[in-house]
Amino acid sequence: MSEIKFVDVYPPRLLLTTFLYHVLHERAPEQSISHKEMPTFDQHRAFVERRPYKFWYLIQVDTEPVGSIYLTEQNEIGVFILKEHRSRGHGTRAIKLLMQTHPQEQFLANINPNNAKSLALFEGLEFRLLQLTMVSRSPK
């Protein structure tokens, strides 16, 4: 089996920030709970430089970057695998490695309810539904 490893995003470097922007660009609306519009590269770079997550990694399989994973201060896991590398177990392996590398009492995952694949991924790792949060946007 191929080796999976993490490359630390911090301190931010242009090459990694550019890869993370590519990852973000691949996300469909149902795969995100935070982005409704694609930020500019400069906005994205400023976000990365703020170090928004406790831990943030590029996921590598052997020497090839396949996605990214992060852990927030609230122990929420976010993971994204590029389309061309999906359905090979990389997401599952990356989540397990993150949980082993940074043990916590509990982990959370905020998932768009329309993202059936992500829901199945975390359910397969024995995550269970905790709450359903709804939002209303003010009319314009």
Image (cartoon, rainbow, N blue to C red):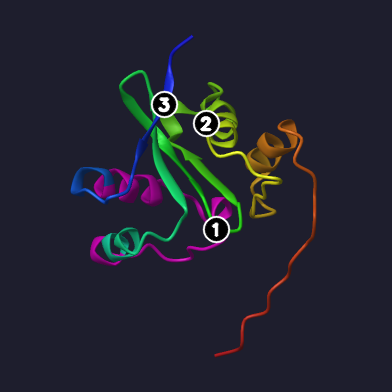
Against 53, is 69 above or below?
Answer: above
Instruction: Compare marks 3 and 2 and give the one earlier in the sequence.
Output: 3
Q: Which residue is mark 1?
A: 73
Magenta segment: 17-43
Residue at 45% in and 48% down: 55
Against 1, is 125 above or below?
Answer: below
The x, y position of residue 122, in whole percent, is 68, 38
Against 134, is 27 above or below?
Answer: above
Specify the amino acid type for callout 1: Glu
**In this orientation, which residue lies closer to the viewer: 59 or 85?**
59
The x, y position of residue 18, in whole percent, is 25, 48
Snapshot quadrant of residue 44: bottom left
Question: In the rendering, which numbered label is found on residue 94?
Answer: 2
In this picture, residue 54 sits left or right of residue 109: left
Mark 1 nearby-residue class (10 Å; few <14, some 14–19, many ≥20): few
Q: Give the SS element for disc 3.
A: strand
**In this orientation, which residue lies closer to the viewer: 40 or 49?**
49
Residue at 61% in and 58% down: 74
Residue at 44% in and 27% down: 85
Residue at 64% in and 38% down: 117
The x, y position of residue 91, in whole percent, is 54, 31
Residue at the extreme top: 1
Instruction: Compare marks 2 and 1 and give the one earlier in the sequence.
Output: 1
Specify the amino acid type for callout 2: Ala
